[in-house]
Image (cartoon, helix red, strand yellow):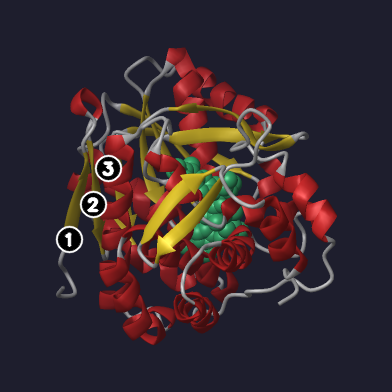
Amino acid sequence: MSENAITTVTVALAGRSYDIHIGQRLLTDGDRIASLVRGQQAIVVSNHTVAPLYLDALLVALGRIDCQVHVLPDGEQYKTLAHVADILDTALASNAARDVTFIALGGGVVGDMTGFAAACFMRGVAFVQVPTTLLAQVDSSVGGKTGVNHPRGKNLIGAFHQPVGVVIDTDTLSTLDPREYSAGLAEVIKYGAIMDLAFFEWLEANIEALRARDPEAVAYAVAQCCTLKARVVADDETEQGNRALLNFGHTFGHAVEAVTGYTTWLHGEAVAIGMRLAAQMSAIDADEQQRLVALLAAAGLPVAAPGLDADALLKAMGHDKKVLAGRIRLILLRSLGDAFVTDAYDDARLTQTLAAVGG
Ligand code: NAD
Ligand code: GLY
């Protein structure tokens, strides 16, 4: 892909289909962004970290559109109903009508909250995702899962509400903290591990270029992940079946996050540890397990969390949203590039796997 190439991936959902535009300098591509706005008015939502970096460029690109800006505090702890209510207050105070478009400029937190606000406002208005973290570009901005956290758990309140478009300017990743960037790489590796062996092999060969944020490598990886996610979402929008495969490593990872009070590991780091555990639990060759562990480590990710209690982890896994009829469902691998959902696993093996969380 040349420096100025733009890739477009379509999420095929009949009347709600939309395009994901991926490339460099898209934030300043006024026509592309403005053409996604229905009507003449937009509510642009960002946060205190991202707004100083990219809000001006976005507002210039939106040119003729009447924009109201809502800037959220930065952090997962602000992903609450109260802060979504603040976004709705801004929309109401600006006399926004049903043809308003909400625009999310930021990472997954801003994207999930803005999408949820758009789902609620006047029973649902259009919204556009302009994701600025690697995690948001390869995962959260695509697929229409929106929502907020509750003191009882993460993402417990929300709605499926698809965006009308996603604009991914890969240049925005240049300002991302290295740890956040590696956390995004965990989700990138996930796609290869669960559904695309050739992509997994490409990642093995190109992980150094990706870590160095080589523009071509980044653009290819983001486009590949969006293509894979678009396929999954088009087949199973509301997660009745295969969309659950995208949670590979997440059930273990959520447990690691929960028992460490959400303070030790970033989500992507916990998912990396979780993917190592899920691979260990899977009936795959030791060589394949080792390849996954090596790729995660090469991406700057942890693969073990010393000092955690296996019983506490098991209990935390029991609180996962993926528990069905009291049984924890796991995403396991048949082989690299081929995952499946199951509740038919050996409980003793699960306990053994959790006991090995420390590495
Ligand atoms: P985040 O939104 O908290 O962003 C991480 C940090 O990077 C924040 O401090 C943010 O302000 C900062 N940041 C964002 N873009 C930046 C940039 N370009 N330069 C410098 N700093 C920047 O975290 P995240 O990892 O993007 O998203 C995590 C959230 O996404 C969680 O709430 C999770 O539940 C959600 N999520 C949703 C889905 C979905 O399908 N909807 C999927 C996965 C995760
Ligand atoms: N991040 C998982 C999903 O979108 O289904």
Residue shown at the point (31%, 68%) measured from the top left:
197
Q: Which residue is mark 3?
A: 63
Front tag of 3 and 1: 1
Tell me where residue 292 appears, x and y as whole percent.
48, 75
Compared with residue 81, is residue 293 higher up or lower down, i.e. above or below?
below
> Disc 2 marks which amino acid?
His
Which residue is at the front of the view, 34 or 12? 12
Residue 31 visible to an observer of this rendering: yes
Q: Which residue is mark 1?
A: 6
Q: Name which of mark 3 and mark 1 comes first in the sequence.
A: 1
Which residue is at the front of the view, 236 or 36? 236
Give the class, few, some or many, for how many residues have Cα within 10 Å of label 2's Cα (few <14, many ≥20). many
Q: Is ligand 1 less than 8 Å from the beta carbon at label 3?
A: no
> Disc 1 marks which amino acid?
Ile
Residues at marks 2 and 1 touching, judged by CB atoms closer than 8 Å: yes
> Disc 3 marks which amino acid?
Gly
Residues at marks 3 and 1 touching, judged by CB atoms closer than 8 Å: no
- Toward which corner of the image does residue 240 lie, by quadrant? top left
Residue shown at the point (26%, 60%) measured from the top left:
223
Which numbered marker is on residue 21?
Answer: 2
Q: Is ligand 1 less than 8 Å from the beta carbon at label 2?
A: no
The quadrant the N terminus occupies is bottom left
Compared with residue 128, is residue 179 higher up or lower down, i.e. above or below?
below
